[in-house]
Image: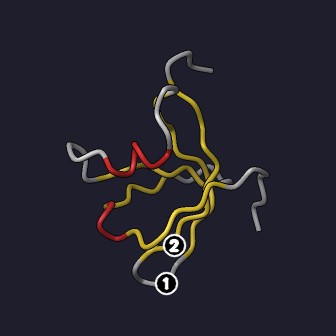
Amino acid sequence: MSLTRKDVHVEMSLIDGSILKGTLVVERTNRLSDTLNKHDKDFIVLSDYDDNHHIINKRQIVKVVEIKSIDAN
C-alpha cells in the first residue's frame, strides 16, 4: 500500500468496442478525471482482475466509469 497513491476500480470502454475492468493507480490527492486529463502523459496502465497489465493510449478511451465493487465478470 502506498501513502501517495491509491487504486481506483474502473470499467473502461475503448474505441474498438472492447470493455476492460480493473484498477488504475492515481495520486492520492487526485481525482480519476485529473489522471485522465493530465496532458504530460499519453498512456495509462490498467491492471485487470486476472493480473494482466494493459498500456492504453488515452486517445483510444471512449468512457471510464469508476465502480465501487470488484466484479471480474
Q: What amino acid type should be assigned to the residue bearing mark 1?
A: Gly
Residue 56 is situated, as x and y percent measured from the top left of the image, at: 37, 59
> Residue reaching furthest bottom?
17
Compared to residue 3, the image places residue 22 above or below, namely: below
- Placement of the N terminus among the 4 image quadrants: top right
What's the residue at 38%, 50% (across, down)?
44
In the picture provided, is 43 more to the left or to the right than 4? left
- Placement of the C terminus among the 4 image quadrants: bottom right
Residue 21 is situated, as x and y percent measured from the top left of the image, at: 63, 61
Question: Which residue position holds label 1?
Answer: 17
Assign a secondary structure to mark 2.
Answer: strand
Q: What amino acid type should be assigned to the residue bearing mark 2?
A: Ser
**Residues marked 2 and 1 touching at CB (< 8 Å):** yes
Assign a secondary structure to mark 1.
Answer: loop
Q: Quadrant of residue 22?
A: bottom right
Q: Distance of mark 2 from mark 1, alpha carbons?
A: 7 Å
Residue 59 is situated, as x and y percent measured from the top left of the image, at: 29, 67
| Residue nearer the viewer, 20 or 69 | 69
In the picture provided, is 72 more to the left or to the right than 25? right
What's the residue at 42%, 83% (across, down)?
16
> Residue reaching furthest left?
40
> Residue reaching furthest top?
3
Question: Which residue position holds label 2?
Answer: 13
What's the residue at 20%, 43% (across, down)?
40
Q: Quadrant of residue 66?
A: bottom right
Say few, some or many: other residues with alpha carbon within 10 Å of mark 2 (under 14 / 14 to 19 / 20 or more): some
